Amino acid sequence: MKNQELIPTPLIDSKQAKKIVIVEDENFSLPQHFRQSYRFCLTIGSIIYLHLMVKYFSEDKAPKRREKKAILIRTLFGQRGGLWIKVGQLLSMRSDLFSQEFCLELSKLQDSSTGFPFHHVKRIVEENLHAPIEKIFSHFEEKPLAAASIGQVHLAYLKKEKKTVVVKIQRPLIEKQFERDLNYVQKAVYFLELLSIYPQLQWEELIAELKQMFLEELDYRIEISSGKRMKKNLKKHKVYAPSIYSQYCTQRVIVMEFVRGVYMSDYIKALQTNPIKVQAWCKENNIEPAKVADRLIISLNRQLYEDNLFHGDLHPGNIILLRDSRIAFIDFGSIGKMERGFLERIILYHKALSSRNYSKAVDFFFTLMPSLPNIDLNEIKRKMIMLLRNWELRTMTKNLPYKERSFNGINEELINMMKPYKLTMEWGFLRITRTTSTLDGSVLYLHPELDYLELNRKAHKGKAKRDFKRQQKNSSILKVVQLKQDIQKIPEEVSELLTFQLDSSRRGAKVFQMTITKSGLFLGFIAKTVSLGFKVCLCFLLYAFFYKHYEWLASLKLGGLENFAQDIALYPPDIWALLFVANIYFLHVSTSLSKKMNRKDTRKNM
């Protein structure tokens, strides 16, 4: 960092820093592979069993089973690590489909990991930089500073540049591990689709998101490029980003500047244990927490709605506090970018919210959905407008919980209102919601009384001024005047276009529904009923299987179901296998037929 005056005094003792556990090389033998596969299949079976029991039996026990299912899934993903943690994090974004408790449980998954031995680090660095490690670095810490599922970070000192740097090294064999885990995920998705579990989630899109995420994170050259662009943009926001030493960077190694400061995560820990010490530290370093919170949110708004290049993982460990209320961002492995059409829609939604035009805001909110079903949108629109008006009152009321007043909080409330109507959101919107929710984890401790509406209005005014200045520099006065006139027409034209699109959506859905013949509906109903029957049969078989292997199930005393399990348990293994295969085959056939006969996706209807 060129400006050394921005480096604050330490807040915590370096001895309190988290130590990374190093795991020595393990030979992944064939028996281990089978044991892992068996445990995986057993856990997936347990999850499916709990899901079916929640869906079709004893509503009084449903909450406990839902909680147990969420904990089971989080434990499974956490134990397997790597790709599975990413799957859990993606599923935690789907608050439009899953319960709040389920999403909260999965959001606890953290991408932290054990470290790998230094001899791997040395080999990878030397292979990629084509030189002995001692020739490039005068000092290289053997113990990692941090570790995650993709790689780990070490402190070092560059000989030639005479700079302290961090070196990020990709894990050995990470690509093979990714391919193996992705294969497991795809098999799990196949069974979930087969059982018609959350079909509205669009599991294929989740797999595509997963592949795209890992393709970007496995190639450090993408992170290098993103880091350079982010540094250029963040400089305009008065946010610091570390310099990257490109001459020492490859597909598997990144060398970047070490930013000295206090991690937001350490600030939060210290605030919880010793608030008086934190208050004195802030005064000593001229730091106003409320000002830092404003800068964080305004910077993220500019990243989202002006630069269209945003830091997708602004958790407290990636934010560094500097003197004079300045901040720095690190780790640009998760960078987001929106398609132009979606960006325009979400900007209009935010602008309508900040100007308190809630009717228009709801209309724009509808355009952020991948499809609109054949329902009366006017009813739900009225409810959403009332919800937004209540939120406005909460933003002006002090001493209320932070989440009730936050922008992310109202988005979650709107999404929860969608659930009974089977309305889902685009992945792009959910990514943004996850990013803002992650940042809330820091803002909550910096400025709990933050007025989001006022700050959003301030952000939009700043954007309008910057847009006008850019046009002034690049255009003549005549063009600027014409542009201003054109801009004034946009809200009216967009509103008319939006109304037309919403009406077309409703008309298209109704016309399509009328074209479905009565015989088609009847066959679809029959297929769906048969599919339900096979799901119930599979549920019974799974219960019998677990009853045979786990004695504690006998204590539940489920009466007739227990007698059925005792009878089935007497069958030989070949009969068991035949029953499972036959049930899954006929379930697949009936489910496929049901989907074909009852296809109601609005996107295909319009």
Image (cartoon, rainbow, N blue to C red):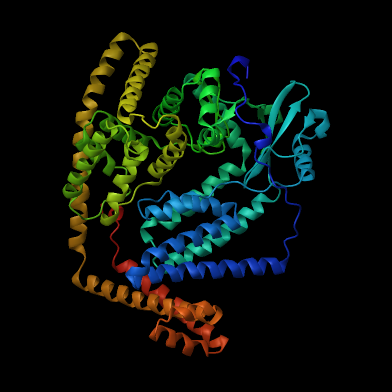
Q: Position of residue 15 (x, y in %)?
A: 69, 35
Q: Is residue 206 above or below residue 447?
A: below
Residue 493 in view in this figure: yes
Closest to the observer: 207 or 380? 380
Which residue is the extreme one toward the top?
477
Tell me if 187 is positioned left or right of 415 in this view: right
Q: Position of residue 333 (x, y in %)?
A: 57, 38
**In which quadrant of the rendered view does residue 561 lie?**
bottom left
Closest to the observer: 79 or 269? 269
Residue at horizontal 61 percent and vertical 53 percent from the top = 178
Give the total of numbered labels: 0
Residue 252 in view in this figure: no
Q: Position of residue 112 (x, y in %)?
A: 60, 46
Q: Is residue 546 above or below residue 288?
A: below
Residue at horizontal 41 percent and vertical 63 percent from the top = 66
**In the rendered view of the protein, which quadrant contains the N terminus?**
top right
Q: Position of residue 204 (x, y in %)?
A: 45, 56
**In which quadrant of the rendered view does residue 79 lie?**
bottom right
Closest to the observer: 329 or 558? 558
Closest to the observer: 516 or 5? 5
Residue at horizontal 53 percent and vertical 50 percent from the top = 109
Q: Is residue 430 above or below residue 248?
A: below
Q: Is residue 40 above or below residue 579?
A: above
Tell me if 201 is positioned left or right of 26 in this view: left
**In which quadrant of the rendered view does residue 134 lie?**
top right
Residue at horizontal 71 percent and vertical 30 percent from the top = 248
